[in-house]
């Protein structure tokens, strides 16, 4: 049942229920987590990636093996940075550098839009990525069916965590679409 929930979820008559599929997954997933093997089953389901959205090929779905892969460089507290989001790989460094320079000149420090805490053993805490876990270089959305690649980069002498946006249905984006990114800076 959990795996068969359609996205988007529609009501009788065809009305699309915004976020309805995620709500149903949260409810069913909450029950399944209490069953033997339930968490493992949910975590191993295939997840959409940006590569899948571009190709539509099942081989580009992310599949968690069930074994956590540590990545010590990602562990820590990260603050959401660099707004507006860069729309291409080529824009990453310039956008991050401009953001760092702007922060130096700012009279008042702004509170980050989100704080992402990446902890050992796949745990994470974040408003933006709630209901997710991580392994290796991926944030795996349990309820939204999306896996996002994370890359550690250094711009303007600072550590940044670059996270791919994802979640597009195959064929809904043009092949020349530039990936969009969410960028976090390591908290001091």
Image (cartoon, grey):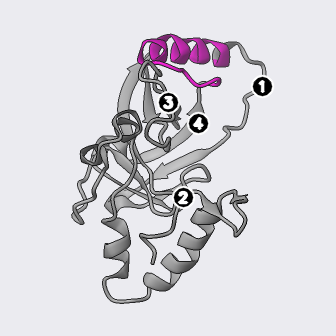
Q: Secondary structure at mark 3?
A: loop
Residue 13 horizontal side relative to residue 135, left or right: right
Pick out the residue farthest to the right: 107
Q: Quarter holding the N terminus?
A: bottom left
Residue 85 horizontal side relative to residue 34, left or right: right
Q: Which mark is residue 108?
A: 1
Residue under label 3: 173
Earlier-in-chain disc, 2 versus 4: 2
Residue under label 2: 7
Earlier-in-chain disc, 1 versus 3: 1
Q: Secondary structure at mark 4?
A: strand
Separation of residues labelled 2 and 4 (CA atoms) = 28 Å
Q: Nearer the viewer, mark 1 or mark 2?
A: 2
Residue at 59% of width from left, 72% of height from top?
Answer: 24
Q: Main secondary structure of the magenta part?
A: helix
Residue under label 4: 80
């Amino acid at each position: 049942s959990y795996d068969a929930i359609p996205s988007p979820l529609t009501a009788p008559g065809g009305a699309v229920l915004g976020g309805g599929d995620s709500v149903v997954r949260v409810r069913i997933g909450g029950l399944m987590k209490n069953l033997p093997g339930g968490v493992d089953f949910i975590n191993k389901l295939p997840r959409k990636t940006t590569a899948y959205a571009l190709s539509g090929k099942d081989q580009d779905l992310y599949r968690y093996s069930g074994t956590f892969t540590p990545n010590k460089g990602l562990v820590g507290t990260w603050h959401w940075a660099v707004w507006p989001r860069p729309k291409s790989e080529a824009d990453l460094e310039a956008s991050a550098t401009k953001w760092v320079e702007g922060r130096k000149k700012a009279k008042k420090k702004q509170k980050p839009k989100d704080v992402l805490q990446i902890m050992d053993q796949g745990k994470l805490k974040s408003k933006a990525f709630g209901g997710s876990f991580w392994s290796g270089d991926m944030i795996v959305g349990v309820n939204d069916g999306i896996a996002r690649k994370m890359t550690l980069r250094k711009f303007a002498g600072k550590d940044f965590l670059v996270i791919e946006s994802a979640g597009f249905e195959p064929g809904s984006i043009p092949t020349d679409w530039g990936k969009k990114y969410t960028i976090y800076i390591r908290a001091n």
